[in-house]
Amino acid sequence: AYTPASAAPPPDAAPRQDPGEVFARVTAHGDEHAIKLADTALDVAAWDAEQRGADAAFAAALRAMELIDPTA
């Protein structure tokens, strides 16, 4: 089995994101998978009163948008 020599360092803290802006950017991108991830990030934000996980969820949605080619 593959085992790395050491664990990857934790990512830097995600900056606070505006949920509406994140969703608008991802929907403009157009990929259905990125949109589903952004929608899930909105759910996380709704459930996470202290916003501890929401910032990371929005950062993940934006990163997915960067990695996935936009829909033509």
Image: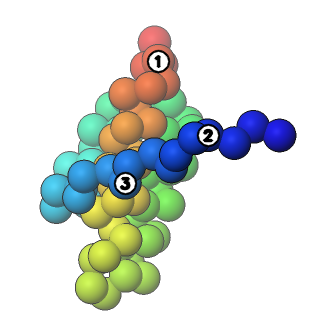
- Mark 3 or mark 1, which is nearer the start of the sequence? 3
Who's the residue at 37% across and 27% down the image? Answer: 66
Point out the frontmost of discs 3 and 2. Answer: 2
Q: Residues within 10 Å of mark 3 (few under 14, many from 20)?
A: few
Residue nearest the viewer, comparing 28 with 10: 10
Q: Which mark is residue 10?
A: 3
Who's the residue at 55% across and 36% down the image? Answer: 32
Q: Which residue is mark 2?
A: 4
Q: Please, is residue 2 above or below residue 6 in the view?
A: above
Who's the residue at 47% across and 18% down the image? Answer: 69
Q: Please give the count of numbered marks on the rendered protein.
A: 3
Q: Which residue is mark 1?
A: 69
CA separation in Å, label 3 and label 2:
15 Å
Residue 4, image x and y in percent?
A: 61, 40
Three-letter residue code for mark 2? Pro
CA separation in Å, label 1 and label 3:
26 Å
Residue at far bottom of view:
49
Residue 54 seen from this side: yes
Q: Is residue 12 left or right of residue 54?
A: left
Q: Residues within 10 Å of mark 2 (few under 14, many from 20)?
A: few
CA separation in Å, label 2 and label 1:
29 Å
Three-letter residue code for mark 3? Pro
Residue 24, image x and y in percent?
A: 28, 44
Q: Please, is residue 34 above or below residue 59 in the view?
A: above
Three-letter residue code for mark 1? Asp
* Quarter occupied by residue 51: bottom left
**Label 2: element kind:** loop
Who's the residue at 45% across and 70% down the image? Answer: 43
Q: Quadrant of the N terminus?
A: top right
**Label 1: element kind:** loop
Residue 26, image x and y in percent?
A: 36, 39
Q: Is residue 35 left or right of residue 25?
A: right
